[in-house]
Image (cartoon, helix red, strand yellow):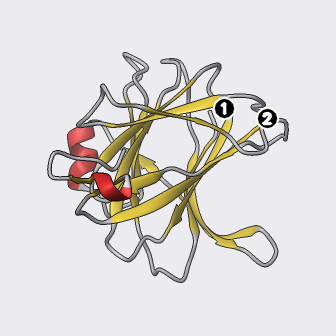
């Protein structure tokens, strides 16, 4: 997920050093027990990462991959796609972004919202709706806006750009409810 051709192997540390800017996406799903999440960086589709959620038996499994900023990622599930998915951006600064594609059946309709998570009481505030765009290219041109794209002809997935905000805030990038 975070490796790229410029990474340097340091065998005496059993580690790899990779330049770049990184953050985390905290993914939470509702009513989807025992799903595994596969996330792939779009430029390296043959190197997916499969994550088992923590709280597998809970009503809301959670996943937390490290991502490289200003890159695109695609998320697949090993079963039916969750009805509700929350994406929380961790360690994002203003103007940081990633593009996330989530795979859903072609006949799915979406409500995509943005809100600030109040960690003290778990509530969302300042909720805004994402607006649909007609192409992935339009989404890329408007990545600082609250937009999403879904290719309903193929069901290839809903894509949204997740713009960052102040590092002191943790917020929900998108709440997807098909």
Mark 2 — residue?
31
Structural crowding at the residue carrying mark 1, measured as other residues with C-alpha within 10 Å and reported as few (<14), some (14–19) or many (≥20): some
Task: Quadrant for the C terminus, please.
Answer: top right
Residue situated furthest left in the rendering? 6
Q: Quadrant of residue 143?
A: bottom left
Task: Out of 50 and 75, give the one closest to the viewer.
Answer: 50
Task: Out of 5 and 134, give the one closest to the viewer.
Answer: 5
* Position in image of residue 142 (x %, y %): 26, 56
* Rendered position, 91 above or below 71: below
Task: Quadrant for the N terminus, please.
Answer: top left
Mark 1 — residue?
82
Q: Element under label 1? A: loop
* Position in image of residue 23 (x %, y %): 42, 63
* Position in image of residue 83 (x %, y %): 68, 33
Q: Residue at x 37, y 52 (%)?
A: 14
Name the mark on residue 132: none
Compared across the picture, whether 138 is left or right of 155 comes to left
Determine whether label 1 and label 2 are within 8 Å by CB: yes
Q: CA distance from mark 1 to mark 2?
A: 7 Å
Compared across the picture, whether 148 is left or right of 44 comes to right
Give the mark nearest the N terminus, 1 or 2.
2
Residue situated furthest front in the rendering? 12
* Rendered position, 176 above or below 128: above
Q: Residue at x 32, y 59 (%)?
A: 69
Q: Residue at x 43, y 20 (%)?
A: 155
Q: Quadrant of residue 123?
A: bottom right
Q: Residue at x 23, y 45 (%)?
A: 138
Q: Element under label 2? A: loop
* Position in image of residue 159 (x %, y %): 40, 40
């Amino acid at each position: 997920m975070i490796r790229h051709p410029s990474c340097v192997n340091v065998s005496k540390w059993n580690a790899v050093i990779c330049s770049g800017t990184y953050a985390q996406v905290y993914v939470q799903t509702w009513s989807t027990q025992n799903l595994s999440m596969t996330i792939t960086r779009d430029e390296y589709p043959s190197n997916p990462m499969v994550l088992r959620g923590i709280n597998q038996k809970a009503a809301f499994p959670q996943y937390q991959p490290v991502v490289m900023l200003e890159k695109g990622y695609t998320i697949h599930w090993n079963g039916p796609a969750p009805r509700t998915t929350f994406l929380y951006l961790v360690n994002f600064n203003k103007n940081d972004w990633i593009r996330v594609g989530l795979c859903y059946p072609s006949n799915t309709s979406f409500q995509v919202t943005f809100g600030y998570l109040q960690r003290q009481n778990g509530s969302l505030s300042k909720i805004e709706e994402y607006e649909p765009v007609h192409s992935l290219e339009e989404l890329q041109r408007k990545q600082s806006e609250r937009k999403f794209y879904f290719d309903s002809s193929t069901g290839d997935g809903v894509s949204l750009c997740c713009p960052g905000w102040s590092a002191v805030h943790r917020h929900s990038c998108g709440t997807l409810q098909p």
